[in-house]
Amino acid sequence: MTAQAVTEPPDLRTAHVVVVANEKGGTGKSTLSIHISIALLKAGFRVATIDLDTRQRTLTRFLENRASWAANAPWNVELPYHHALDRGRSDNIRDNETAEFGAFAAAIAEVEHEYEFVVIDTPASDSYLMRLAHSLADTLVSPINDSFIDVDVFSRVHHDRTQRGQVAQYADLVLEARRKRRLVDQGIIDWVLVRNRMSSTQSNNAKQIVTSLKRLASELQFRPADGLHDRVIFRELFPIGLTALDPIEEAMRSNTLSASQASARREVDTLVATLQLPERSRGMATHMQARHEWFDRISRYYREMRR
Ligand SMILES: Nc1ncnc2c1ncn2[C@@H]1O[C@H](COP(=O)(O)OP(=O)(O)O)[C@@H](O)[C@H]1O
Ligand SMILES: [Mg+2]
């Protein structure tokens, strides 16, 4: 029997928690939360969503728009079970933190056994609540734009790129969440850094970013991934609560899918596939089996990366 085989399996919740986060604002957290949630719903999963961004509430606003579209749409518009956290209203920061913590714990408890996926959109801040959200993540998706300013929140970017950067504040937060997670339930956080708003023209800067991310990946233990290109379609459908994955050609009263829509759909599908989320395959009776299979596969991946 190998050493791994005698390790206790982790006590997995039914729901696989996908946290979309990055301490940097405007990198595409809400855009990715929206597209991942809708893609999972369309794949037939039971999906719950939680909006921790009590200030911007982008995911919540999107889902409100989607619900009102759903009321009149000629086709079935999938909606997740959504929970938006309220802002603490007290003047006392500590009281607000306690209230938010309680509300978040209640939101998770409500959905963790009923749903297959919980997708959590987060604000760009470092708070107690954010640290808690990170330590609950099974898959942590951090969008990053092709800019060294964005890389700098993971690892201090040096003028001399041959020098190693220090682990910067956001990566530190994730590494701490990972340590906590291992202690609490021997769980694992699969951290995927997703490039977002990629330009269609391959620039020298983008190439350098890709090289930097590859180098940082083994140091900080994340998986780098290509995500979404910068496309109007990823932002223009927000007011009607739709995405490129919806049958918008019908909504627009046109019978054909534009080339841009088709590429956008492919891109979202590829991104979701890259996340390697637990999916029941043939012969698997339950989502829980898929969760265990996911855990084995992802832990193997990180073990090999550390070698
Ligand atoms: N792939 C993309 N293509 C086009 N616009 C995008 C893309 N990703 C994000 N955006 C736009 O960039 C802005 C910031 O995105 P958002 O998802 O709100 O970021 P965050 O939640 O991290 O603050 C928004 O205006 C959004 O519509
Ligand atoms: Mg946002």
Image (cartoon, rainbow, N blue to C red):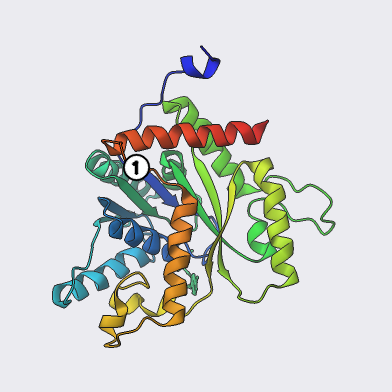
The residue depicted at 64 percent of the width and 36 percent of the height is 305
Residue drawn where x is 31% and y is 71% of the image = 246
Q: Identity of the amino acid at label 1? A: Ser
The residue located at (45%, 31%) in the rendering is: 187
Q: Which residue is mark 1?
A: 281
Q: Is residue 261 above or below residue 288?
A: below
Image spot of residue 33 (x, y percent): 40, 60
Query: How many numbered callouts?
Result: 1
Relative to 144, residue 260 above or below: below
- In screen coordinates, is 171 left or right of 125? right
Residue 240 as seen in the image, left or right of residue 216: left
- Residue closest to the far front: 282
Q: Position of residue 151 (x, y in %)?
A: 66, 57
Q: Seen from this angle, which residue lies furthest top?
A: 1
Residue 291 figure quarter: top left
Figure check: 89 above or below 189: below
Q: Quadrant of the C terminus?
A: top right
Q: Nearer the viewer, residue 271 or 54?
A: 271
